[in-house]
Amino acid sequence: MTQPPAAAANRRGTVAFVTANTFEFDSRHRRATAALAADGWAVVVVAMRAAHLPVDEVLENGVVVRRPPVERRILAALPRLLRRPVGALLGLDADAERLPPRGAGLPGRVRAAGRRGLEILAYRRRIAGWTAALAAAAPEARLFVAKSLVGLPVAAGAAHATGGRHVYDIADLHVESGRLAGLPRLLKRYLARREGRWLRGAAALIAVTPAMAAAVAARHGVERPVVVMNTRERWRPDEPRPRSSQLRDAAVLGPGREIVLYQGAFRPDQGIELLLEALVHPILAARPLTAVFLGFGVLEDRLRREAELQTGRLAVLPAVASEELLEWTAGADVSFVGTPPVTANQKLTTPNKLFESVMAGVPVVVAAGTWTARLVHAERLGTVVDPWTVEGLALALGALLGQPAGAREQHRRAIRRTALERFNWDVDRERLVELFRRLE
């Protein structure tokens, strides 16, 4: 089994992170693990397997990544004889690890409910094996870290089994996020109670924004979590406004095209559908504008179809590694962060793309009604769209893109200066490192 470099191992102890992804694009945990490794911790990450990734690897910063076998197929929750008929009934492929988009009408809603129930059952059955895999992958660890609700009982279970402690990094209010936000009220209450029990048993809590920290403390009667925001490293700090052609070149766009960038997960709750409508609104229709979508997700097929219909107006590119993302982002004229307050979670949290954009000196467009919107307004990082309508979004994008060149450049430099001086990983890393030093 791959071992960490001897110079880094056990100077402070071993901390194990569990992630419900492959760790490739988990920028928050990648920053945290790198910071702790640099501070002398031996760091092990237990991630999900993927065919294109090694089972075990040591990153350049000394972080060890292990991808043990964990059963993730949803239908594996059922006895073997029931998998095929239930899969046919619910429209689930035998090897499906994620739920497909919900179908239309009453049949679609009924199938979606059945799928969600089966997904929860599969997750419950997965916990024991996943917990054992985590404890075996990092037997010397005494601190176990999770940042998702699905990983929280795994970290807590491994800590209990090894005599260690667990830390919960609350990047999202999971019961009020994504698909879970649409679950029946009784089921959400059950999940919230379970989360609260594991949360109150944690050795320490971390939250992604001050608003999230306050909400968690109020909901669960715990001490206010330490705030570690999704800021980025002080990238190319000696340059007032870094420039890059990487995004433009990859999308094959000429020098006169304006670029509105969306990067991240292609999910329905991010405002992507509204952006697609705004692009054809009369306010924007005549502009030499291209929306570039950088990432992956359930809306990818729709975006690619739209790109075929609107040649030159839309481009869809695959996700890039976190360490390369700022270079790509710097080539945009505007960053569409969107994130309307569809769920309670979206009102409290902030996406990585916000701080990636401002570190690259790119003005952002966000929906009103969130902590993110308050920050953008207070710090003049871009435009808050209120009301969140097609016309409102088109007006906001048109106003930003229509500024005189000198004013646009001055705005970008001011945004960049704010990021370098106040909203950067140097500040948040110190909070994280100090917290873990107290847990030694």
Image (spheres, grey):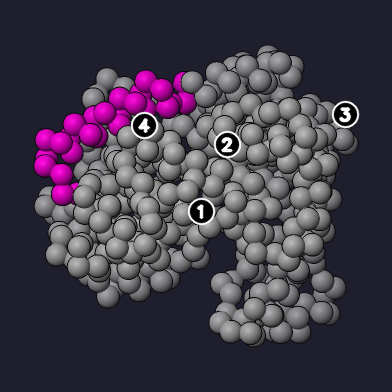
Which secondary structure, mark 4?
A: helix
Amino acid identity at mark 2: Ala
* Residue holding disc 4: 379
Ranked by sequence position, the earlier of labels 1 and 3 is 3
Ranked by sequence position, the earlier of labels 4 and 2 is 2
* Residue holding disc 3: 163
In the image, the segment drawn in magenta is 401-426
x and y, in percent, of residue 310 in the image:
25, 71
In this picture, is 210 found above or below 184?
A: above
Which residue: 32% across, 72% down? 306
Which of the 4 quarters of the picture holds residue 383? top left
Of 245 and 357, which appears nearest the observer?
357
Q: How far apart are marks 1 and 2 (CA)?
A: 14 Å
Q: How far apart are marks 1 and 3 (CA)?
A: 40 Å
Which secondary structure, mark 1?
A: loop
In this picture, is 68 found above or below 116?
A: above
Q: How far apart are marks 4 and 3 (CA)?
A: 45 Å
Which callout, 4 or 3, points to the residue nearer the camera? Answer: 4
| Residue 83 lies in the magenta-colored region | no
Ranked by sequence position, the earlier of labels 1 and 2 is 2
* Residue holding disc 2: 211
Which residue: 52% across, 24% down? 428
| Residue 415 lies in the magenta-colored region | yes
Q: Do the residues labelled 4 and 3 touch (CB within 8 Å)?
A: no
* Residue holding disc 1: 341
Q: Taking 322 as reference, is 105 left or right? A: right
Of 310 and 369, which appears nearest the observer?
369
Q: Distance between the residues labelled 4 and 1?
A: 20 Å
Amino acid identity at mark 1: Pro
